[in-house]
């Protein structure tokens, strides 16, 4: 995933100039994968839970468990949603910044990175309630804020370093975080503890992170765990660099993504035997597991959409993938499920429960809510309205 066509003697800016044309094209598979990721955030999990409520079975029960975050250690499909988005951010910045550097220069690219990061960070505070509450009941760090920080630091590294330098930075972040979490003692606990509330990341949040914390005394998007999250974004950068190459066939691109992804998953779980796979503190082993699964999903989407050219099925995901921040904010401000309840709740829900099957009313609310999300994204795409930070 870290392969690159640039000779060692070639500067980063020279490489970007030579690949500017390639970087300018948009990969439908990346937009579709981003939309697929958002699909679950916007309410697709409710469909599975609705089905399980109608007819409980081993399959729906298993899927329901996969659509619930692990309480602490371990890994479920739902734990992949956020790191997959961070991974896609890394992929996307390769294409967007390469084009900007080639056409307008690195200084313009840096200004754009700083502006986008700041706006995304502010939107994150707004998403978490903004200033509707008094201090200190205001959350400073959250999902969008973490995306902003990952985008900022990964972009700065991409603008100034070649691929080898990026690899060194990524490895240093993961190994350095492991060393801090393993060897730095926590007052009253000691060193090497990864238990909930009794580890270095949670301790630093409780002592130094001001404002509201999502989990009470600490935050899953806290201070120290942002470091390995940047590593997740850099894994996406490596994938983007690989996909950008014009001297490699689509089959080879998919092949390396599959090998790299599977290897990363295995290495992550092996590392997890000492440094557990924990999303809420974004352990280095979690980075490798989530990054590996992200690469595998990317390989599947790239093979189907770009190599086989089966694209029509992916169009609804593309609608969402082209406006992910708008859809995410709308799900918070409008609330697609809340709106769906006004359309399919009450007696409508009771009717479906009585006529079709018990629990079918809840499933209909989930279907309507998800349909509203698709409808909004389709309308914005048709009108060519996109939120550009």
Image (cartoon, grey):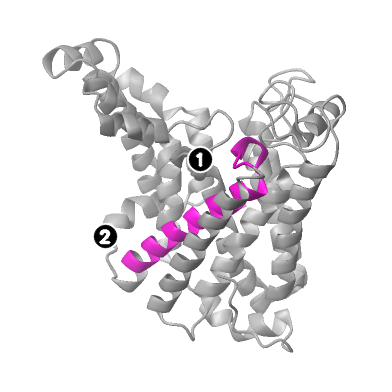
**Image x and y of residue 197, in percent:** 72, 26
Dominant SS of magenta comes to: helix
**Quarter residue 307 falls in:** bottom left
Which residue is rendered at x = 39% and y = 66% of the image?
302
Q: Secondary structure at mark 2?
A: helix
Foreground: 382 or 45? 45
2 or 1: mark nearer the eye:
1
**Magenta stretch containing residue 291, yes or no?**
yes
Q: Which residues are magenta?
A: 276-304
Please give the residue where the numbered disc 2 appears in the rendered image: 312
The mark total stands at: 2
**Residue identifier under label 1:** 75
The image position of residue 347, as x and y in percent, is 23, 10
Residue 333 screen position, x and y as percent: 52, 29
- Marks 2 and 1 sit apart, C-alpha to C-alpha, by 32 Å
Residue 9 position in % (x across, y down): 74, 89
**Is residue 316 on the magenta stretch?**
no
Q: Is residue 176 left or right of residue 387?
A: right
């Amino acid at each position: 995933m870290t392969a690159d066509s640039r000779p060692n003697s070639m500067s980063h800016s020279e490489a970007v100039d030579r690949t500017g044309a390639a970087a300018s094209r948009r990969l439908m598979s990346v937009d579709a994968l981003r939309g697929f990721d958002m699909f679950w955030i916007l309410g697709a999990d409710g469909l599975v839970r609705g089905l399980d409520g109608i007819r409980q079975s081993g399959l729906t029960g298993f899927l329901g468990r996969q659509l619930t975050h692990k309480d602490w250690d371990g890994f479920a499909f739902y734990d992949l949603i956020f790191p997959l988005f961070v991974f896609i951010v890394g992929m996307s910045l390769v294409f967007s910044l390469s084009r900007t550097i080639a056409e307008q220069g690195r200084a313009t690219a840096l200004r754009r990175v700083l502006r986008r990061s700041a706006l995304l960070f502010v939107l994150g505070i707004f998403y978490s309630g903004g200033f509707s509450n008094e201090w200190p009941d205001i959350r400073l760090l959250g999902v969008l804020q973490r995306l902003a920080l990952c985008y900022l630091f990964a972009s700065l590294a991409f603008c100034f370093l070649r691929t080898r330098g990026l690899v060194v930075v990524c490895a240093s972040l993961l190994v350095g975080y492991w060393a801090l979490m393993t060897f730095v003692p926590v007052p009253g606990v000691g060193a090497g503890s990864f238990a909930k509330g009794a580890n270095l990341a949670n301790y630093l949040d409780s002592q130094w992170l001001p404002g509201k914390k999502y989990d009470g005394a600490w935050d899953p998007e806290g201070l120290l765990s942002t470091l390995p999250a940047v590593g997740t974004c850099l894994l996406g950068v490596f994938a983007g660099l690989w996909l950008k190459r014009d001297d490699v066939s689509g089959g080879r691109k998919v092949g390396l993504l599959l090998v790299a992804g599977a290897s990363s998953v295995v290495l992550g779980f092996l590392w997890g035997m000492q440094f557990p796979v924990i999303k809420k503190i974004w352990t280095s082993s979690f980075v490798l597991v989530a990054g590996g699964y992200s690469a595998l999903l990317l390989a599947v989407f790239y093979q189907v959409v770009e190599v086989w050219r089966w694209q029509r099925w992916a169009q609804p995901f593309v609608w969402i993938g082209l406006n992910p921040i708008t859809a995410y904010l709308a799900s918070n401000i409008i609330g697609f499920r809340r709106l769906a309840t006004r359309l399919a709740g009450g007696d409508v829900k009771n009717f479906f429960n009585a006529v079709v099957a018990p629990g079918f009313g809840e499933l209909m609310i989930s279907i309507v809510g998800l349909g509203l999300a698709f409808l909004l994204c389709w309308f914005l795409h048709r009108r060519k309205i996109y939120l550009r930070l």
